[in-house]
């Protein structure tokens, strides 16, 4: 069974950087688009960025454009979300998501907290 595992979250100050990882087990995902979402307390889960199976960036939300980038390392079966110039409003649980054999798979999430 495919599993996605996020890591790299933590507590940082505004202006600092973090890189999140989404690692797949049980399958390679070189043929899958992978998405990063986030959910802040009391808010709906929102799409942050998408990377296509080929590795080109399909989408980065306007709220993070110019600060966040998404990349993938096929050899490591991992997708990354590089977050720079973090703001308190970036505080959320970050999830990765993919579709494998027609089934939507979510990771368990990793908490990112940005303090002033």
Image (cartoon, rainbow, N blue to C red):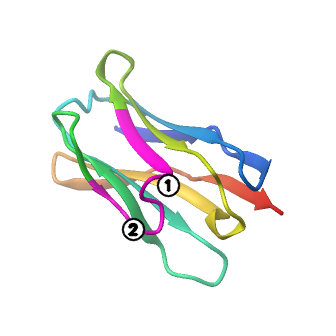
Q: Is residue 83 above or below residue 63?
A: above
Q: Is residue 6 left or right of residue 60?
A: right
Residue placed at 36% from the left, 35% from the top? 71
Residue placed at 20% from the left, 43% from the top? 52
Q: Is residue 36 above or below residue 17?
A: below
Which quadrant, please, contains the N terminus? top left
Q: What SS does tag 2 mark? A: loop
Earlier in the chain: of badge 1 and badge 2, it is 2
Q: Residues within 10 Å of mark 2 (few under 14, many from 20)?
A: few
Circle 2 residue:
62
Q: Which mark is residue 83?
A: none
Q: Is residue 93 magenta?
A: no
Residue stretch in magenta: 59-71
Q: Is residue 116 left or right of residue 3?
A: right
Q: Which mark is residue 95?
A: 1
> How far across and down, in percent of the image, does residue 70 sit?
39, 42
> How far across and down, in percent of the image, does residue 108 sit?
55, 52
> How far across and down, in percent of the image, does residue 103 sit?
24, 54
Which quadrant, please, contains the C terminus? bottom right
Name the quadrant containing residue 88: bottom right
What is the total number of numbered labels drawn onto the structure image? Answer: 2
**Residue that protrudes farthest toward the right in the picture:** 116
Query: Who is closer to the viewer here, 107 or 96?
Result: 96
Q: What SS does tag 1 mark? A: strand
How far, Cα to Cα, is label 1 from label 2?
A: 18 Å
**Residue that protrudes farthest toward the bottom in the picture:** 42
> How far across and down, in percent of the image, does residue 3 sit?
42, 39
């Amino acid at each position: 069974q495919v599993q996605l595992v996020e890591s790299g979250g933590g507590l940082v100050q505004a202006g600092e950087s973090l890189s999140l990882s989404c690692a797949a087990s049980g399958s390679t995902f070189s043929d899958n688009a992978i998405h990063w979402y986030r959910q802040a307390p009391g808010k709906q889960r929102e799409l942050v960025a998408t990377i296509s199976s080929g590795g080109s960036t399909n989408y980065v939300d306007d709220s993070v454009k110019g600060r966040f980038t998404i990349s993938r390392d096929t050899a490591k079966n991992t997708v990354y979300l590089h977050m720079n110039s973090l703001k308190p409003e970036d505080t959320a649980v970050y999830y990765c998501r993919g579709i494998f054999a027609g089934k939507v798979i979510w990771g368990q999430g990793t908490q990112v907290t940005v303090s002033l």
